[in-house]
Image (spheres, grey):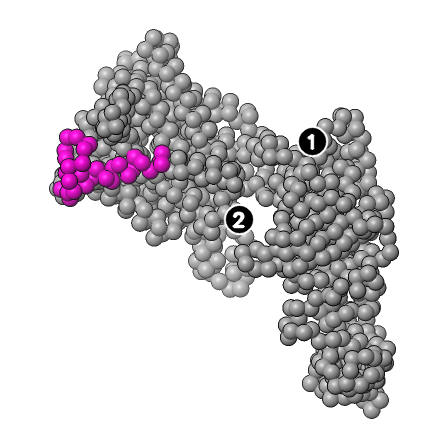
Amino acid sequence: MIKKGISRLYLFLIFAFLYLPIIVLIALSFNNSRTKVKWGGFTFQWYLGCFQNEAIMSAFMTTLQITFLSAIISTLIGTLAAFGIASMKKKGQAVYLGATNIPMLNADIVTGISMMLLFVKFMDLGFVTVLIAHITFSIPYVILNVLPKLKAVNRSTYEAALDLGASPSYAFYKVTWPEIRPAVFSGFMMAVTMSLDDFSITYFTKGAGVNTLSTMLYTELRKGVKPELYALSTILFFAVLLILLAGNVRPGRKPN
Amino acid sequence: MSEMGQKKMSKHLIDFIDISKSFEQTPVLDEFNLYIRENEFLTLLGPSGCGKTTTLRMLGGFETPDSGQIFFDGKDITYLPANERKLNTVFQKYSLFPHMSIAENIAFGLKISRKSKSYIDDKIKYALKLVNLDGYEKRSVHSLSGGQQQRIAIARAIVNEPKVLLLDEPLGALDLKLRQNMQYELIRLKEELGITFVYVTHDQEEALTMSDTIVVMNQGYIQQIGTPEDIYNEPENAFVADFIGHSNIIDGIMITDRLVEILGVKMPCVDEGFGENTPVDVVIRPEDVELVEPADGYMEGDVTSLIFKGVHYELDVQANGYEWLVHTTKYVPVGTHVGIKVIPFNIQIMHKPESSDERAVEIDE
Amino acid sequence: MSKLKQQFLAGPYLLWIVGFILLPVLMILYYAFTNADGIFTLEYIFAIGSETNRKAIGLSLQLGIICTIICLLLSYPLAMILSRIQFKNQGFVVFIFMLPMWMNFMLRILAWKLLLSKNGVINTLLEGIGMPEISIINTPVAVVLGMVYDFLPFMLLPIYNSMTRIRKDWIEAAQDLGANNVTIFFKIILPLTVSGIISGIVMVFVPSLTSFAISQVLGGGQVLLIGNVIEQDFMQGMQWNAGSGLSFVLMIFVIASMALVNLFDKEEPVK
């Protein structure tokens, strides 16, 4: 019984550590006081301000565009690559998987800088370079989700479908695809998550004119914190909460 | 009843007294009483959910009863933690530690009781020899087959020289052939070690082959306690009869002593003392049904299916609205019109359970 | 589809690997081993010996190790409790503890800046109850706090995953063989979660060693980590060769620490 009490207390303490900062952010987003963290009455003005703030809104739009474009493209390339790799001999697989590990194991700052060094040789930094960078670090997550599933899919069921007179594309759609679809989807979701959360790589590849939420926040934070950002945090927190609850996506990024 | 059922052996080693246990309001055991004698091979037999595994887990120390007491060697062990009990368990899923070698697995309990290195080494050798896996010390758990893993699990338990070995469906995951081999190995082990075995299974054949005493359980109640011969030949109720073999169990009425009516036909039998016009269950084993010329039987019917089972044929015979299960060595093709006959000695008469669903069949002590 | 044909599906990815994974790494190597005139030099590799760089690397290692240890000490009991919890909705409880990780990385830092600032929430509260103010913003303590908050889930998740793979009957078998809770922990639970601990360590240590944003925001420019030096080389000083030299060294550090960590990981197959 005592042990149970200690466990509960421990859970509660960690819970408090994780959520107190978020709760404070949410509370302050309704606080009618710009300078002090003292309670100055209830207000929605920071939410209005947040939607009227051009820097915030344009960073928000850029983030959405980068995230979905990069997730879609990396899922496409990654899934195709998984099919290719699955059909290779051991040596070929090892080469591909080794290369796939590079962006996953490298520190973000090194990956960001290395890409920046390459990009500035050929083009101006901007939306496209950020997009390419995000696709690059997302593909490995897609491959690592899809490839194991693909290897587990029994090739004989696909061949059985062919034997029963299905065309290869029909057999793929009816037999292989339904089995790997969840893995492709979770790869896509992971790509979305990684892209939304990235700061370092975006920071080095974005150039002057473009900002995602992460880099915009970084610039703002160096100047000091504005209440509009609390409002933004609150909106994003509940958006994420709703999406996760609605999608019933299992929590957890896969470890390397 | 159980006085008669259990063989006359030495003293009680384990006593379950008035044990009740429920999980989330579902009663699993209700006022359960049982004793186990020293040196006995006792099997708890029953379908899943009958309470047999819970009984074993309470003995092992992994569950505590809601009420009642468990005595071991005269001492109350009801609330003694598992690691302080002088008995060892062979688990259903082998439960070998995956990060240890075979030798480390076997040495686990000995190291905890701080035995000397040479003692441990000798014990490992001895135990591996006993389970016919000499030289497997360095092997990893994953390199072993299911049957081998099971034998290591047994070795790991017996090196601690427990007074009682608990076995929780230890052969359940093995294929038929291996299971039969392991049954003989277990009997041999039991004889060599001279300790008490408490064995849990849902496989009646396993129970009949190995046990000194079988405890048939259903829905948290003991249905019958007895030797394999008792249980097989004289099942006390329809549940036991049905569970022990694939029998024909037919509703009947005891007209008077030595005369029973089933399916509209009166048949002579040998049972007495049921009273007159009493509803009963009538059990007739498939091998006791004789197929004769239609005119010579108690009733007529048609063979509806025929399967060759190696030694005998298994037939379904549709007669008087009942599908009879029949074992015979004669070949009787499907569609044959036959007569059914059973000699009086092979008709078993049983009391109907008090409630309709056999739930409340409890053995009166 | 034939095997050979199917292999071509990896074609686009092959181009991507060459163009955007290998080539960039080569670019770093090129800049790290040449000077501004494109002539081979080891000057920028040896530059780690300079006082600023030595100090920055030392501090990074120090904070990275502290952060990793704190995360491990916090996560391990948490993972153990979570994996044993017998709520009907265990998944939901775990979800609650993972949720903050979906908050944007920068927003999580923002929250801590808000809490720790001189006029921040904590000081306002302390002031309210008549306690002395604390001033840990712009110190290494604040940076470590921020890192722990940011990276805790990366430690929790792999340990929790390895914890849930421990079968209950292994624990019972150990109890049956006479093991008490201490023995069970050291002989069964700990060895079976080593691989989870190892991946947790890698996933926390690498980002905390190489972080520059957290130290910038919560350290207020006072805490100079190796990441900050590299960032300044590129974004302020335009010293690309020096920055590449340091990046190369950082790469070696990361690879070396992973190799070291992997030495301890016997990678037990847990079924």
Magenta highlight range: A16-45
B127 lies above or below B298: above
Few, some or many residues within 10 Å of mark 1 (<14, 14–19, 20+) = some
Location of residue C68 by image quarter = top left
* Secondary structure state at the residue bearing disc 1: helix
Chain at tag 2: A
Residue, x 73% and y 62% (percent of image)?
A: B216
Residue, x 18% and y 26% (percent of image)?
A: A223
Residue on which disc 1 sits: B112
Amino acid found under the numbered disc labelled 1 = Ile
The numbered dot on residue A215 is: none
Residue on which disc 2 sits: A152
Residue, x 66% and y 55% (percent of image)?
A: B19
Residue A141 position in % (x across, y down): 41, 40
Front position among marks 1 and 2: 1
Chain at tag 1: B
* Secondary structure state at the residue bearing disc 2: helix
Q: Is residue A18 magenta?
A: yes
Q: Is residue C258 magenta?
A: no
